[in-house]
Amino acid sequence: MVLTSAQLWFFIALAALVIWFRMRKKPLPPPVSRGKQIALKGEKIQAWLTPTMPLACLLEDGKSFGPAFQNKEPPRLPHGPGCQCKLLPDYRRADEVFLLKEKQLPSQECDLGLLSHHELRYYRYCLIAAHAEASEELQQEYRELALGVDVAETFAQRVQAHIQQ
Ligand SMILES: [Zn+2]
């Protein structure tokens, strides 16, 4: 039997239809896999980091509040004169709760520009260590914490120069 071109196309189309139909019948993967579900729901304080911020803002920056967190109730905002803190929704998926995904933590804007999570933490520790309202003990504690954060030497110098202005 010699196939005409029209017949050939008919068979190709038929084969394509069969393949498409079989693929369609395959069960779809579940829309949300385990670990992607929201495990913790709450709110997080985000302070504006700058040397003139009240000490209370610097100390509470990044703290999470909610029924599933250690701290249940967020504080009343503002913390005091000059406070620019915001309460942002804080949702964490199950896999984020158990695995600390440092690399995926978002960068954040402050008076030094957009900083990575590590840079931001270093800057916050240095601001507390140099804060006029902080006790000597607290300053010492945060000076040591700052030393433990891995940031570039140039960034550390930039922060020190900025704080001493
Ligand atoms: Zn505040």
Image (cartoon, grey):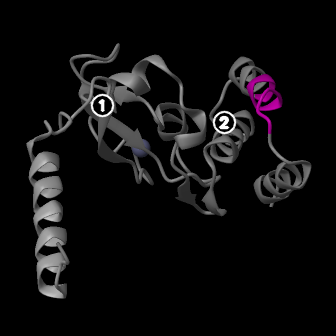
Q: Is residue 79 left or right of residue 33?
A: right
Give, as a single range, the part of the protein colored magenta. 143-150
* Amino acid marked by disc 2: Ile
Could you give the CA–CA distance between mark 1 and mark 2, rounded to whole angstroms? 35 Å
- Residue matched to label 2: 128
Q: Which mark is residue 143?
A: none
Most prominent secondary structure in the magenta stretch?
helix
Q: Residue 40: in sight, yes or no?
A: no
Residue 99 position within the rendered picture, expressed as x and y whole percent measured from the top left: 50, 21
Q: Residue at x 42, y 50 (%)?
A: 83
Decide whether residue 144 is among the magenta residues: yes
Q: Residue at x 68, y 24 (%)?
A: 135
Q: Is residue 83 above or below residue 100?
A: below
- Residue matched to label 1: 36
Q: Is residue 136 left or right of residue 46?
A: right
User: Quadrant location of the N terminus?
Assistant: bottom left
* Amino acid marked by disc 1: Lys
State which mark lies toward you, 1 or 2: 1
User: Quadrant location of the C terminus?
Assistant: bottom right
